[in-house]
Image (cartoon, grey):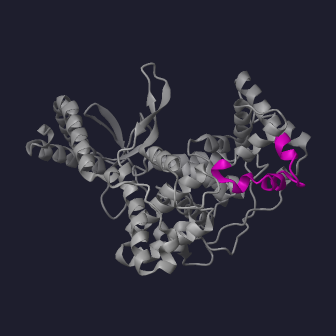
Amino acid sequence: MTTVFHEPPVVSATPAVGHEAVDDRFVARRPAVDWPATRQSHREAFGRLMGPPFVLENAGSQKQRRQGLELLLAWLADQPGESWQQRWLASGADTAGTDWRRIPAQWLYDRGLYSEGRNALLCAALTVVICADIVRPSLLWFVASVTRGGALARCMARIRDGEGFARLRELCDRDPHASAAAQGHSVHRAAVIIAAKGGAIADITIGDTLELLDAETNTHSRPMVHGTAFYQMLHQMGVFGPSAPRRLRELRSTRQRTPEELIDRYHLACRPVRDLLVDYLRERQPALDYSSLRRLAADLGNVFWKDLERHYQGIDSLHLPTEVAQAWKQRLRTRPKTVLTDTGEKTVITVERIGYRQCLTPVRAFYLDLAHWAIEDPSRWGRWVVPCPIGEEEINQRKAARHRKSRMDARTRERLPVLPVLVRTVDERRKTTEVLLHAARQTRPGDTFTTAGQTLTRSIIARPTATEKIWVDDPITGKRRDLGVEEDLAFWAWAAVEVLRHAGCFSRG
């Protein structure tokens, strides 16, 4: 059973941060303050969460969910407020970002109930409570705290708007240019907006979409991908109405962020260091293009200082003790990586980050620039002059270049034996796509043809495009394919491999 919650959209006059909308109609809905589900009593909420459609088929999993819901509702009930939403906001978890799990963990610890298992069950139960529309965390909380693993979207599709999510997935499947990653991002973003604003996919506004995309840009150092695909899918569904612009770029004109905005994305706790980084970016700005300025802000604000604040609460000086500097460089040098064992199980190992020296260089330049500028303007920069924690030998690019060359040669030697397989595969794919395209051109729309071991149906296009497209429906996968694009990609893949092979690139090392 799928329950769909519909609410009239409530718009906000607050424009999206970082971009300017070209039309005042495209504004985001304000989060509701009160709604029926969040006013339920403890008994009513728990009883509802223990019944369909929230019940799991596996008895063991259902038992764990029950325990997690009992702990979660008890934690929220212990917060001040007249509704579950008010209690959620009063707990401080909504503004804690990625550290929100520490708040219920402290509550468990204070009552002598803490264990990693209990805290994990409590936090996992929050997804169920969100899908039941009992609490609505903010968009910023979702962007900072919820991974795109699919759990939220699956729960929302089962409980809140199954028809809407099914239609969104169908549109993604039928679009040959929408990759699996684009579909995953689109479905996740739709689930996030519904969870934060209420309603169903049909209630999402253009302002909601812009607000989410801007929140992602302001929260993450690297721009999120497939935002354009998400907008286009909702537009094709008719969610935005017939008067909405067809493309995302028609909605807003991007502008370059100021140094203050670039640094404030990372919410630095130490105000003097934050102001210093802003002043430093202003000094460097005339000599840098905008892309380099963004990268420098990310290196100094996020990779360097924000990492120190995460691990050393209250740090307020650039003069780093030796152990602090070494620990930071070690964290920068390594990263976790998930691999499959021989038994097929996933495990996390620590590997070296190849480009970590590129992150050390701007930090060393930052320290040296401050020392140099202090000679000319000691009143402004002098108090920040301290020993640089990064030695010249640590950013030796010659050594890094030799290591990179060694890795490339080893990779070439490792893959050289499979070169004949690669050459044969790309050539066969080129010939197959060419035969399929030729056969489809000879087939009338609606008719089925078989060639190259595949049975396909020439698609009937209700509204043909200006350029000739050869669309076919694949009965095995249920997807619509553009054979012209497939043939074009196969040809250029074959051409690239052949050029590199005859140029001798595959035999080096």
Q: Which residues are magenta?
A: 73-99
Residue 353 falls in which quadrant of the image? Answer: top left
Is 5 on the left or on the right of 497, as rendered?
right
Residue drawn 52% across the image and 49% down it = 324
Classified by dominant secondary structure, the portion drawn in magenta counts as helix
Q: How many marks?
A: 0
Residue 193, x across and y down, in percent: 64, 56
**Residue 104: in sight, yes or no?**
yes
Residue at the extreme top: 343
Is 243 on the left or on the right of 356, as rendered?
right
Residue 136, x across and y down, in percent: 74, 53
- Residue 75 in the magenta stretch? The answer is yes
Residue drawn 31% across the image and 62% down it = 467
Residue 78, x across and y down, in percent: 87, 46
Is 190 on the left or on the right of 359, as rendered?
right
Q: Quadrant of the N terminus?
A: top right
Please tell me which residue lies in front, 422 or 119: 119
Residue drawn 40% across the image and 49% down it = 176
**Residue 257: in sight, yes or no?**
no
